[in-house]
Image (spheres, grey):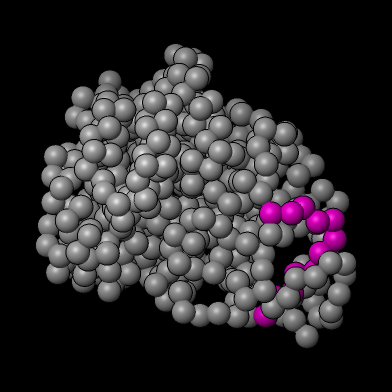
Amino acid sequence: MADLRIVGRAVVDGRLLDEVTVEIDGEFVSSVSIGENGSGPKLLLGKGQLLLPSATDLHVHLRDWNQAYKEDVFTGTSAAAAGGVTTVAEMPNTSPPIRSPEALKERLRLLAARAIVDYSVHVGPLEKVEDANRALELGACGMKLYPADLEKIEDYLKVSRESGMRLVVHAELKGGDEVEAVRMLLSHIKVGDVVRFAHISRAESLKMIELARKELDARITVEATPHHLLLSYDELDENTRKISAVRPPLASIADKQYIFSGLERCSVDFIASDHAPHALEEKLSEQPAPGFPGLEITYPLMLTECLEGRLGISTLIKKLCKSPAEYLGIPKGDIRRGFYADLVVFDTNVRWSVSAKSFLSKAKYTPFEGRRFSVRVASVFRRGELIYDGELLVKGGGAHVRDLRQKRG
Ligand SMILES: [Zn+2]
């Protein structure tokens, strides 16, 4: 007898099925079958409800430490849970930054104590191979380079080649040019290099990467954010310009359309929120801080695109759930026997407008304010445990991705 059976409409292996039974035993999915089957406690999905795998977000900033006034690990991962995201990978530009194995250890201690969802951490640039090896042993999922680090790209590629530490690049030159930064980076990348381009925003950048992927056998991957996929600078009104300040900046309508089309063309591999909260005063100042929260709305925003016919649902699940989980090496991102029971129930027969006032993030603003959604997160399971059902139901329990790799249901 299963611990729980969820019965109803679900997307399994990229296919929308009308009646499926998903049995959960402990942390894992123990069976998936067509129709209603098995015995034991049952959650029967309502009309209009849809069961999907939960998301893995490869690009979040949870702040905390000296910037706990912007966000902390608890509030940031609560926002994740509320958005149907049960695994996050943190970026290292915290204060102080995560630029050594010691700082990584410290960060992992904090996450273990406070995180609601499962987590992994990127380290900042490390110049010594020994440090990269140590960070890998501790579970680092990649080394993130910021625009100021790109001058030394050859050094970091060398560390990456010798240690096996994957690189993640924020491609922007100091003047803010993404296209030139991508061109420069591609000229250094060789066959075999493993490089993920974070938040690509310009059509020209993506075209160059598409070409390079054909020519080089390097494992180059591309991340896109919901704001670069769905918003453009041209369409913003005066009031939202400060709130929507972000790096790289929002681009033209043609840029966003080209990046969006990259999802179906498979040149965009991951959708990541780049959840980057700041205090409201910092956003409204003359020099608005770059970034805004995104964890709570990324999945509903993108699923709305699917339900309104602009994006295939199997494409979305691949970019938001499956591929990022594979990147982290964990059995998540699909509803499948032996995978972790990381699941979201969505209500799909609703129309509502997003209001950042209700965010669990400390940052209660969004450039998507007022946007109409046709789906809403109803409940979220993290490794078989119900952690959100309109309210947060747990105070912690997030696990380090490294410890989730070997286990299988
Ligand atoms: Zn970022």
Say which quarter of the image contains residue 197: top left
Q: Horizontal placement of 2 versus 62: left or right?
A: right
Say which quarter of the image contains residue 368: top right
Q: Quadrant of the N terminus?
A: bottom right
Q: How many marks?
A: 0
Residue 276 visible to an observer of this rendering: no
Q: Position of residue 338 (x, y in %)?
A: 62, 76
Task: Identify whether 157 is placed above or below 312.
Answer: below
Q: Residue at x 26, y 28 (%)?
A: 180
Q: Position of residue 36 (x, y in %)?
A: 87, 70
Span highlighted in magenta in the image: 14-25
Front residue of this view, candidates 32 and 41 = 32
Q: Residue at x 42, y 42 (%)?
A: 214
Task: Identify whether 100 is placed above or below 96.
Answer: below
Is-magenta flag for residue 332? no
Q: Position of residue 224 (x, y in %)?
A: 46, 39
Q: Quadrant of the C terminus?
A: bottom right
